[in-house]
């Protein structure tokens, strides 16, 4: 059986299974293709919502919005995550990949499913938004494609688990799995829950679309669908946090401040993140306040606690590593002298900051039971999740790609000057998208809405002029983000297909400072650990969090009394 | 490093630095504050979403709406009836593709029981400019007790996608001084 072929990575010395390498490539390439398609739909949506431009007609707008959600939120992210799972198991554990044929079958199913659902949307009979809330019904193959995709992703998770078992059996590593693999394991465990929830709701809905089931209760659908829809965002969080640790390790040789704390934080994700379906049900009929309060807070914010721990330990690990390399002056020399010209670092650090400040804080605020009344289904919601899924996950995955190109594709990154700027252009655009949509949402502007001038409505109504300004700024930010996205795709395509081959050892880390030695930080360095810069950063974060939280209670207190 | 197995085999016994312990304590305490804030607001705040809900059917609900209109219509606005219900009344507002029906006139400072349901798809009751947003489901009737505290013209936008005419779906609520 063991005709597995390996090569030895000249940079890390790791044995690399060639079929794992091919699978990582295939999944990453599929991901980037869907990012390009979905990104284009996203740009057309943002330009339509800019009232002065109003690009698309209504039917195309709603179609493009459905396709945008499908292609980027589901296909780009899950395909890339499968690549991450294979990387974190077979590559990092020095192991062969389990059942490569099954992994290819999974890839084929996911690709087929993704294409089928895209075709369904483009045919125009499935303009139901990504969420496809019944009783609104899509074409049968819309659901079928999603089911095929989910089954494929589930098989891929199985390959990941199998690889962990093989690596353990064949003793390809010593001791416990690396933290990054642990984070990927967290993502995979959540993925199983997520995909199972998806199957539980999408299979009956598919049968309903064929006329075999008479009725799908809209409230039940939302509860179970969001057990997939929101939990899949928790796969993203686990995956991108794992990648933050990976990039910090690859660039700085950073060690987690404490294995116990970081792994405990991932464990909190597994235990509590799945309650987040409730975030989408806070203003629904038929559910008690007790249920809403407990679930929306992830059982007293224990999953938020996990993220706040990573928020300290990721930059803290980098600071400790940088200080060990001699960047010890003042509070911020470690950060000033970080490799800001390396897109893997800049993308990762921008993502860390924006995920916390834009996506994280807004998510907790809008997930507060009562505050959701002034936010539900306004543009604030997409403002929030562009902070998490785009500024957080997508930018992190882009940063990781700059490391995968030399390590897995064995190519030099093409257009290095362009690559240097790419995370900043994309990051700035995404920050704008997130902030201006949240601003418009605070002013009441509806999400998923073609015409906020209500030109054809039976009554007159206008949102405040500031809202129109916000929508224009959002459109401009979307253009900036699209340019950043296009830069990324040009760089990836040029590197992967036309890049100079890499045969020798490459230097991942910043050239300045001392070379990375084996131990740049010691675990539980109880007496010696100094991370004042990180403390200042988390201090600023905490103050912003508390202030913004209570500002929103103030907003809430100004609406009509209701009970 | 985080990409290699922990260098200490028994890593779970390593002490945790005080900085991390303090941050964990702060974050945990803040989580408790946020959790109990929701409960506190249920006890003392004036803006809590009612949970009173019933199962209904489009036909049954529509009959109640029509009875409202027959009993309380005072005028028409752009062809849509305007009702002025008595103080404290049960008012039935319906969403359907693509209209909120009927138009309602309320008195400032008085409480009313506002029922919401849909005849067809899900809709989003989004009351502007004050920005109150409630999801409206077909088959479910949600009863909110509202006390409009400022007079003026309010618009009900639909903020859940409900088909190609979604962006035309508006309604009106007027709040008048006595």
Image (spheres, coloured by chain):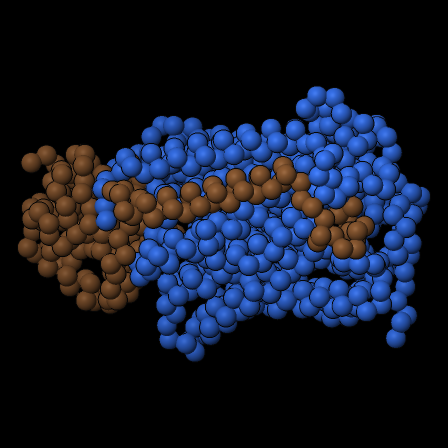
For chain A, give the colour.
Answer: blue
* Count of marks, rendered view: 0
* Residue B48 higher or lower than A352, as above or below: below
Q: Is residue A457 left or right of residue A100?
A: left
**Is residue A480 in view?**
no
Residue furthest bottom in the image: A212
Question: Where does the image place residue B98, in percent across and percent down from the top left?
Answer: 29, 52
Q: Is residue A408 left or right of residue A370?
A: right
Question: Where does the image place residue A226, in percent across and percent down from the top left?
Answer: 47, 59
Residue found 6% across the figure and 55% down from its top: B71
Residue placed most toward the observer, A218 or B33: B33
Residue placed most toward the observer, B160 or A115: B160
Question: Where does the image place residue A39, in percent across and percent down from the top left?
Answer: 59, 44
For chain B, give the colour.
Answer: brown
Residue furthest top in the image: A330
* Residue A433 higher or lower than A185, as above or below: above
Q: Is residue A413 left or right of residue B126?
A: right
Corner quadrant of residue B139: bottom left
Corner quadrant of residue A524: top right
Residue found 43% across the figure and 52% down from its top: A296
Quarter of the image containing the N terminus of chain A? bottom right
Residue found 79% across the figure and 51% down from its top: B8
Residue found 74% across the figure and 21% down from its top: A329
Residue furthest right in the image: A504
Question: Where does the image place residue A5, in percent across and percent down from the top left?
Answer: 90, 63
């Amino acid at each position: 059986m063991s005709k597995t072929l390996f090569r030895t990575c000249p940079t890390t010395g790791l044995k690399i299974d060639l079929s794992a390498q091919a699978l990582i490539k295939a999944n990453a390439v599929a991901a980037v293709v869907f990012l390009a398609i979905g990104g284009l739909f996203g740009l057309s949506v943002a330009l339509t919502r800019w009232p002065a431009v109003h690009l698309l007609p209504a039917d195309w707008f709603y179609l493009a919005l459905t396709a945008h959600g499908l292609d980027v939120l589901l296909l780009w992210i899950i395909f890339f995550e499968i690549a991450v799972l294979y990387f974190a198991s077979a590559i990092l554990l020095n192991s062969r990949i389990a059942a490569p044929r099954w992994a290819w079958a999974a890839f084929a199913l996911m690709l087929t499913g993704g294409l089928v659902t895209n075709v369904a949307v483009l045919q125009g009979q499935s303009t139901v938004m990504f969420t496809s809330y019944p009783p609104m019904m899509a074409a049968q193959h819309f659901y079928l494609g999603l089911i095929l995709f989910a089954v494929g992703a589930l098989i891929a998770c199985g390959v990941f688990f199998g690889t962990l078992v093989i690596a353990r059996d064949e003793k390809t590593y010593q001791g416990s799995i690396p933290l990054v693999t642990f984070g990927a394991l967290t993502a995979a465990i959540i993925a199983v829950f997520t995909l199972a929830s998806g199957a539980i709701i999408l299979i009956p809905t598919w049968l309903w679309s064929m006329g075999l089931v008479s009725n799908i209760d809209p409230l039940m659908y939302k509860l179970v669908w969001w057990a997939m829809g929101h939990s899949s965002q928790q796969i993203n969080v686990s995956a991108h946090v794992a990648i933050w640790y990976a990039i910090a390790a690859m660039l700085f040789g950073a060690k987690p401040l404490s294995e116990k704390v970081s792994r405990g934080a991932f464990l909190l994700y597994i235990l509590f993140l799945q309650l987040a379906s409730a975030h989408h049900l806070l203003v629904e009929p038929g559910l008690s306040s007790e249920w809403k309060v407990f679930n929306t807070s992830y059982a007293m914010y224990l999953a938020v606690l996990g993220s706040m721990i990573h928020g300290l330990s990721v930059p803290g690990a980098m600071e400790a590593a940088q200080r060990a390399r001699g960047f010890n002056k003042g509070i911020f020399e470690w950060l000033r002298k970080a490799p800001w010209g390396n897109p893997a670092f800049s993308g990762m650090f921008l993502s860390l900051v924006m995920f916390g400040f834009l996506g994280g804080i807004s998510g907790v605020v809008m997930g507060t039971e009562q505050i959701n009344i002034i936010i539900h289904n306004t543009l604030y919601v997409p403002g929030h999740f562009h902070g998490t899924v785009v500024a957080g996950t997508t930018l992190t995955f882009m940063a990781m790609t700059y490391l995968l190109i030399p390590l897995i594709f064995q190519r030099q990154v093409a257009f290095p000057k362009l690559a240097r700027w790419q995370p900043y252009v994309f990051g700035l655009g995404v920050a704008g998208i997130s902030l201006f949509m949240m601003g418009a949402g605070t002013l009441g502007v509806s999400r998923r809405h073609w015409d906020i001038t209500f030109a054809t409505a039976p009554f007159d109504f206008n949102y405040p002029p500031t809202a129109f300004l916000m929508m224009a700024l959002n459109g401009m930010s979307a253009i900036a983000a699209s340019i950043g996205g296009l830069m990324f795709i040009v760089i990836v395509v040029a590197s992967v297909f036309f890049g100079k081959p890499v045969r020798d050892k490459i230097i991942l880390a910043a050239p300045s400072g001392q070379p990375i030695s084996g131990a740049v930080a010691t675990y539980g360095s109880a007496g010696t650990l100094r991370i004042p810069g990180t403390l200042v950063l988390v201090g600023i974060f905490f103050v912003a969090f508390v202030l913004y939280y209570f500002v929103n209670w103030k907003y809430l207190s100004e609406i009509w009394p209701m009970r | 490093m985080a990409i290699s197995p922990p260098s200490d085999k028994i890593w779970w016994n390593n002490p945790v630095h005080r900085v991390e312990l303090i941050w964990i304590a702060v974050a945990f305490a803040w989580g408790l504050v946020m959790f109990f804030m929701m409960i506190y607001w249920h006890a003392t705040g004036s803006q809590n979403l009612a949970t009173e809900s019933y199962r209904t059917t489009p036909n049954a609900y529509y009959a109640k709406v029509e009875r409202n209109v027959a009993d309380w219509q005072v005028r028409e606005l752009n062809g849509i009836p305007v009702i002025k219900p008595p103080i404290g009344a049960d008012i039935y507002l319906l969403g359907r593709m693509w209209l909120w029906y009927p138009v309602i006139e309320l008195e400032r400072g008085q409480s009313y029981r506002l029922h919401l349901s849909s005849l067809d798809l899900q809709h989003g009751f989004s009351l502007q400019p004050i920005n109150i947003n409630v999801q409206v489901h077909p088959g479910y009737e949600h009863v909110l007790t509202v006390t409009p505290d400022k007079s003026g013209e309010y618009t009900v936008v639909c903020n859940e996608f409900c088909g190609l005419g979604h962006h035309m779906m508006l309604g009106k609520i007027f709040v008048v001084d006595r």
